[in-house]
Image: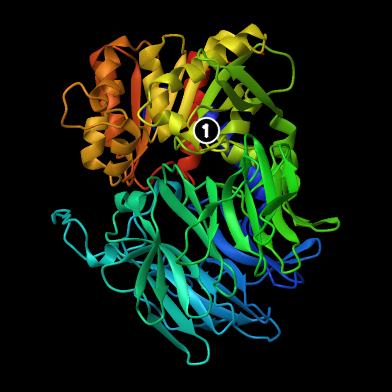
Amino acid sequence: MSGNDVRGSATWDLVEEYFRRLHGPALGQPHMLLEPSCSADGSRIAATGLVYDELVGLPRQACFLVDGAELRPLTGPSGSSRQPRFSPDGATVAFLSDRTEAGRFQLYLLRTGQLGEAEATPAVPGTVEYCSWSPDGTKVLLGVAGLGADLSGGQGSGTTYKPKEELPDWHPHVEAGVTEESWRSLWIHDLAAGTTIRMSPEGLNTWEAVWLGPDAVVSVTSPAPDEGAWYTAVLSRLGLDGAVTELARSEVQLGCPAASPSGERLAVVEAVCSDRWVVAGDLLVGAPGAAFERVDTGEVDVTTTQWIDADRLGILGIRGLETVAAVYNAVTGKTTEVWSSTDTSCGTRYPEAAWSADGRLVLIEEGYSVPQRVVVLGDDRVELAGIRHPGTEYLLSVAGKAETVSWSAPDGLQIDGILCTPVGDGPFPLVVNIHGGPVWGYRNLWSMLYPWTPLLVSQGYAVLNPNPRGSSGRGQNFAQLVFGEMGGADTTDFTSAIDALVERGMVDPTRVGLTGGSYGGYMSSWLVTQDQRWAAAVPFSPVTNWYSQHFTSNIPYFDALFLDGNPEVPGDKFHSRSPVAHASKVRTPCLNIAGALDRCTPPTQAQEFHQALLEHGVESQLVIYPQEGHGVRSFPSLIDFCTRVVDWFQRHMPARS
């Protein structure tokens, strides 16, 4: 690769053609579905669809009704609309839309049996992140973020939409800590009165919330609004009368609250977490004000909770590489699995689905070789509308296959992963694609969730997607193995994978590379300092200096927690586990990538490693995208990113025909 501009190069043309063949046939139509919802009687199903009208920017969001084998638009093309939610009687759909002001979502109501436009509700001072119907259908709960509030790493980092200030070019950027716009609050829209009023008190940050019967909500709350405050948030009851009562706290994190319609039963997930809203862990059930009991879920890390009725709780989660749906009966105390699969999964960050009142499960099923489809599971399996067109057929023709692989780390711990390989026999050149978190995990998903995976496979590379110690799906003890140990024993989870795959004749040991973002960016940077076998590395959104990360990131609590260290102590893990401190050991060419808007792992982290490598004579390039945050998501930046990734690996470890 030469020069700064890769547009018009042979690889750019190849990558651009890849995306055009994939998305071109579906322009104006959804290419991905998420946030499934169904009416209580199961007769109506809706979902959010991601739609490209052209390959520019991010896709717009739109709400769709599932009408048999068809997806029927519920909302028009004006702005983005998402999160359709049916009222308890099924007569009204609530959804969020930014049709009035791009980036600022407000609540809209659409009567399903009437013609006409959706009804706009009174605007709230912020942007609505989620909504929830009251059990009696008379009110809608709104979770509202201030304009400029922090986004989590899983949301792409940066901040929520904030109107641009008209300031001269010379005007300095000023930060003063917590501002009025930093907070998240709860509001209630009353359908009969037509009013929307705030119900959470000042000075209380509400990260997520659901109804707790007709006159209260249950929320994950903290006394401060910064991202670091989420890690110590508690579970609280907020009454409509303004009273706030703490219900539970934990030494780890709490999320995914759910309450039965009467509010007499309550569920919450307790989990080791590395990112807000990325929660997979133990299920706790109890009555408000009483002690919670830990439920035996059959070794499933729970990711989604929904009370089906007064006694039955629907859950989804992961067990290893398996996605599982089950029903917990609060009367008998038994959990019954209703569906599981390792060949397919559902949900993006983690498994998600919706339940009807009679216990039917509505999910958007997908796999590496299975384009998305809406499936209803009850007495029978019913497949409805899906995302299948010439673009998905093209991807299936070039993406190779995915298979589960396992190996033993040096300490005997079994590690699993998903290996995607081209057509033909090995040994293949291999790219190790390390996930973020560290508490997250790969599942069998379309494109493995990332477009560069099938792209690399189409160019002759095998791609290993490993779930090292610290990943979700193997219980909380497994997740906690990375506490205080990032860059420790997890290092050999990756090197032992290469040894095993080489021994099995699947991988060429002279052509093995690394990539990954966030924790994956850290490990891609760290591994090249610990072992010189790597032919090339592409860390993106990395951490390379834990000391400077702590004082420039918006989540300093995270690194103190997961390193179990103190940046003020010389020689602490903040220093000894930082890749920049070991740059002299690196021999691997590194392409370091970051987004300028990233507040979780600021772009200076990539810059520090780049300069440290150059100082020691190691080939390195630094690429910073001015309009991206935690990861590269929008076009044409995504084409540029994939072009540079493919070029880097082809240059340093070419796939041989």
Q: Is residue 238 in view?
A: yes
* Towards the viewer: 113 or 467: 467
Q: Residue at x 34, y 75 (%)?
A: 125
Against 545, residue 430 (above or below) is above
Residue at position x 27%, y 11% from top? 584
Q: Is residue 282 left or right of residue 537?
A: right
Task: Identify the image quadrant of the N terminus.
Answer: top left
- Which residue in the protein does label 1 denote? 12
Q: Nearer the viewer, residue 586 or 135?
A: 135
Q: Nearer the viewer, residue 181 or 410?
A: 410
Coordinates of residue 506 in the picture (x, y in percent): 66, 13
Q: Quadrant of residue 119?
A: bottom right
Residue ID at (62%, 13%): 501
In the displayed structure, 222 sits above or below 86; it is above
Q: Residue at x 26, y 20 (%)?
A: 576
Q: Position of residue 566 (x, y in %)?
A: 22, 32
Residue 87 spot, x, y in % from top left: 62, 77
Q: Is residue 356 left or right of residue 349?
A: right
Position above or below: 299 against 310: above
Disc 1: CA contacts within 10 A as few (<14), some (14-19) or many (>=20): many
Asked if 619 appears above or below 152 in the picture, the reply is: above
Residue 25 visible, this orientation: no
Determine whether the residue tagged by mark 1 lies in a helix, strand or loop: helix
Quadrant occupied by the C terminus: top right
The image quarter containing residue 319 is top right
Amino acid bearing label 1:
Trp
User: Residue 83 in the image: x percent, y percent?
Assistant: 56, 65
